Structures are given as structure tokens and as C-alpha cells.
Amino acid sequence: MTRWRSFSSRAAAWLLITTVLLASCALADIPKTPGLSAGGSKKDKLKAEKLPPCKACTALVNSFRDGIRRTERSKHDGGDAAWEEERLGSYKTSELRLVEIQEALCQDVVRGEDQCHQLAEDYEAQIEVWWKNHQTTDPDLHRWLCVEQAAVCCPDGFYGPNCDPCPTCFGNGKCKGNGTRKGNGRCACEAGYAGENCDSCGAEHYEAFRDETKLLCSPCHRACATGGCTGAGPNACRVCRSGWLMDSGRGGCVDVDECITANPCTKQQFCVNNEGSYSCLECDKSCDGCSGDGPDLCDKCADGYELRDGMCTGTETQSAEDATEDKPQTDDDRTTDDEETPATVEEVQPNDEL
């Protein structure tokens, strides 16, 4: 009896170990879902993201506005127009419509969806008050809820805890904290503008227009290096960029012709001067050195070519080779060894004995 119990215990242990091993193998064979990791999917991370207070409230309001548009009902053709008007009018501000909107609230939010659902619960009472008592007289839900009730946003053009007015930034920048209860109200200038109120031009820009309310800054000419310019064109540069030289007589920057001063190209190339730079292009194949493009601008003719009528022209042998190289290949030229050797009768006749 004792021996039987010992055998049963060992059998039960082996059965348990086998079951665990089989389960582990089965789990290992299950394919992993793409995009999922120990930290969760990208979608889950976006849902759980925490937005700043004003942005979060704005996302909730935008979702509610989408719900209003989604639940709009137009009049039907025919029937009693007065009855339709009365019925639709009552639905517009009804609790039924509010419930329809709230059921889908925040489902369209990508970033901060979880936070949006929490805010919907926190502000549920305020939203119901606005829906019943204020949506006709005060239709701007964002101002009513986010600015006045929750006090997490400011109207556009205001910033900070007390919603102080933003500076104008001369129309060339944005007030830091604009529309929120955050920020210091300083101007963040657009590219090309500088100054506390964005009322001056930045580096490498010049003043193209100014009046009492507007400033327009334009970029300096590409010839100008760091140091900027006094106006448009290369003549207004204070310092010249590489590839340009300051003209001591006329002032301003003059393009350097590297093709003359440096001769930067190889023997089988010719130089083309560009504004502030240069390019090296290949000579014609008939040339042994050249000063430009074409067989008439060769320094001398390459092997197999001779000078005729001011142009390097191929000799008879070279002309034939060039013609062969330039001739497009046809189907007749694409013959194989099998096509060139006629097949014998024995090779093409079927074997009737098979």
C-alpha cells in the first residue's frame, strides 16, 4: 500500500510538470500583436497622455461641439411645418439630446482621452447648467466653461492667472501663454524679427516696410554673410559670404569668377561660373581638353578624331565605332547562339515513340 502511494505521488508530480511545460510551449507559439510592448501600444499611450489644463478643457469642449453637430436634425419635407418646428425646437435643448451627446463624449479625442473622460465627469454639473440655462444666451461653451467656470483658460489675446492683455508683438510674433492661465506674456517673435515687441529686424534681415502698426523684414541677399545688410541686393551687404568679394570702389559684394582665378576643374572638364560658386561639366568625347560644351570648343582632338571645319570629327574607323555605339539595338540584333545555328531535323522533330 505504501509503495502504491509513493508511485501515485510520483505520477501526479510528473503529470503536473508535463502540464506546465505544454502550457509554456503553447504560450510561446502565440504570435505577438504588432505595436504592443511591455509599455503598452502607442494608442494606449496617447489615450493616457496628460494635457495642460486649458488644452484638456478645450479638447472636451471640441468633442462636445462635435456631438452637437452630430445630433442636429433637419426638417422633413411635407407634413405639418408648425408641428415640425415645435418638435425640433424642443429637441434642440432637450435632455434626450444632451444624453446622446454625452454617451459619445471624448470618443473622438486621440491625445488625452482618459483625461477627457475624467473632465467630463468633473464638469458634468456645469455642462448641464449651460445646456439648460445658457446655450441660447451664452452660446460659446469654451468661454463659459473653460474661461469663466473652470478658470483654466483665458480669452484669445490674454494670458496668465489674471488674464492680463498680451502685447501686440507688432503682428510678428505670439504672446507666450496666449489664451491660457500660464506664460509670462513676452513676445515669441517669428523668424527674421527681434526685439521685446518684435518691432525690429533680426540677423540677416533688413527693414523693407514700416508704419505705426506694421513692420516687414526681408532676408538679405545670399551674398551677405553674418553681419546682415542695410537693404536689398548684394550691394547692401556689410560682410560678404564665401564666393563673393567686397568691392572697395562701389561697395557691396561682387561674385568671384572661380573659373578664371582658380581653374578648379580637371583637363576633361570645363568650368561654368555660378553666382557665388561654380560647376565643372564634362567635355565632349571628341575633345582632349576643352573650353566649353561641344566638339567645336576642344583644345585639341582626342585620338580617333581630327579637326575639320573648326570641329573635331571622327575618322572613318572612329565614326563607324561611334555609329555602332549610338545605334539603338533592335530585335534582330538580340540573337542567341541557338538562333544563329539552324536546328537539325532530328532536333526539332518530336519522338513518336515516346
Image (cartoon, rainbow, N blue to C red):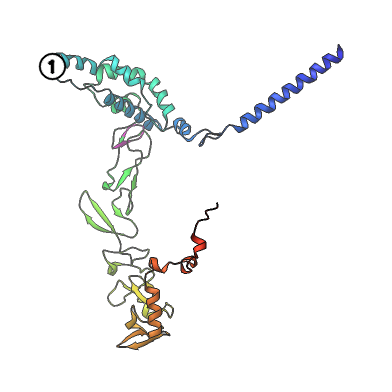
Residue 282, image x, y percentages: 39, 75
Give me the residue at 26% from left, 15% from top. 94
Which amino acid, by three-letter code, is at mark 1? Ala
Report which residue position mark 1 lands on. 81
Query: Camera-side residue: 122 or 90?
Result: 90
Q: Quadrant of residue 241?
A: bottom left
Helix, strand or loop at mark 1: helix
Residue 61, image x, y percentages: 32, 27
Residue 111, image x, y percentages: 41, 33
Q: Is residue 120 left or right of residue 19?
A: left
Q: Please tell me whether the stretch drawn in magenta is mainly helix, strand or loop.
A: loop
Give me the residue at 37% from left, 87% from top. 306
Q: Quadrant of residue 323?
A: bottom left
Give me the residue at 82% from left, 14% from top. 5
Magenta range: 157-163
Q: Is residue 291 above or below residue 211?
A: below
Query: Camera-side residue: 9 or 256?
Result: 9
Q: Is residue 286 visible?
A: no
**Considering the image in quadrants, where does the N terminus appear?**
top right
Q: Is residue 197 above or below residue 108?
A: below
222 is within the stretch colored magenta? no
Q: Quadrant of residue 221?
A: bottom left
Query: Camera-side residue: 325 or 291?
Result: 325
Give me the residue at 31% from left, 46% from top. 173
Q: Residues within 10 Å of mark 1 (few under 14, many from 20)?
A: few
158 is within the stretch colored magenta? yes
Query: Camera-side residue: 320 or 201?
Result: 320
